[in-house]
Image (cartoon, rainbow, N blue to C red):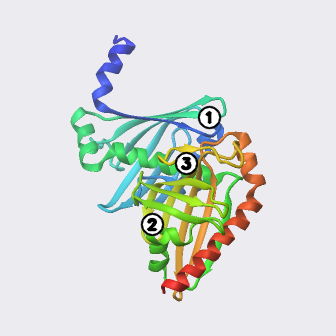
Amino acid sequence: MLKEKEIHNDTTEREIVITRIINAPRELVFNAWTDPKHLSNWWGPRRFTNTFKEINTKTGGQWLFTMHGPMGDFPNRIKFHEVVKPERLVYLHDSGIDNDPSGFEVVVTFEAQGDKTKLTLRSLFPTKDIRDMVVREFKATEGGNQNIDKFEEQLVLMSSEVFTLSREFDAPRDLVWKVYTEAEHLSKWWGPQGFKMVTAKVDLRPGGLFHYCMQSPDGHEMWGRFVYRDITAPEQVIFTNSFSDKDGNAVRAPFNPNWPLEVMNFVTLTEKNGKTTITMKGGPFNATEEERILFVSMQPMLDQGFKGTFDQLDAYLKSVK
């Protein structure tokens, strides 16, 4: 019989392992990973959607769905061998064909670490060649990490701390998108009323930064940054924003050290009859309980501040139409 170390060595070349610390309790993480009403909002890599046909996340159950992406439509079947709430999932993932030679085994573990969860996703393929093929041709590692990115975003949207604001602008969506994502335009309207933006640089790509410095009426400088997570032009941009230093490092808010270091934002643009509605949702990301409580208590201030910022956007859009 192989020893544990020998088994690990024997499977290492056939597996993909992704680990992430999720800032949410294990019960919530497990529920969001297995409840169909949540799965439909986040499952799959970026730019993929799904048609769910059947889903039963219990031992012996199965999940049938078709994944739609840039390369076409892909039938999927997940057969649950083991569901131990809230600790572990074990299943076979294939294309729905019995004895599919490319089917692979998956073990998902949820390990409680205080009020956080260590999530480990381990996929074991029949051979090294198949593992290498899905990594090379289907970018499986990148797709797996995107999947967990979307999962983290879904957890933020599920929280009770989410701040929401919506505003209609008398301008076409393409123009609003341009004004929302280009430095030369952002510098003309972004920020609290009365502040002047003195520098702004935008690197509009996943992982890129919008790094800026604003000057208050009394001459005080305040730096901030967006870190872009996903861009779907001209429909949606997802980013975290923070106060920062001049080098782009996240720092604590000058007005209260318990303000969340990061706030995740979802900005969606929809157009109707030549007018564009911006809907913004935001919530604490990787935050402590104290930070989340403060964020909720200050939402009236956020509402007032962003209404002022959107007033500036409205005036600027009228000047560039």
Q: Give residue 104's position: percent from left, percent from top.
A: 35, 38
Q: Which residue is outermost to the front? A: 219
Amino acid type at image mark 1: Lys
Question: Would you say 56 lies left or right of 7 here?
Answer: right
Q: Which residue is outermost to the bottom? A: 273
Task: Look at 52% across and 85% down and name the residue there.
Answer: 319
Q: Which circle, 1 or 3, is nearer the viewer?
A: 3
Task: Look at 74% across and 58% down and name the residue there.
Answer: 299
For label 1, the residue is 116
Query: Residue 182: in sight, yes or no?
Result: no
Q: Give residue 252's position: percent from left, percent from top.
A: 63, 44
Amino acid type at image mark 2: Ala
Amino acid type at image mark 3: Ser
Question: Would you say 106 lies left or right of 194 here?
Answer: left
Of 46 and 196, the residue lying toward us = 196
Height in image: 270 above or below 137?
Answer: below
Mark 3 → mark 2, Cα distance in angstroms: 17 Å
Q: Give residue 196's position: percent from left, percent from top.
A: 58, 66
For label 3, the residue is 244
Height in image: 108 above or below 221?
Answer: above
For label 2, the residue is 183
Earlier in the chain: of badge 1 and badge 3, it is: 1
Check disc 1 and report its element: helix, strand or loop.
Answer: strand
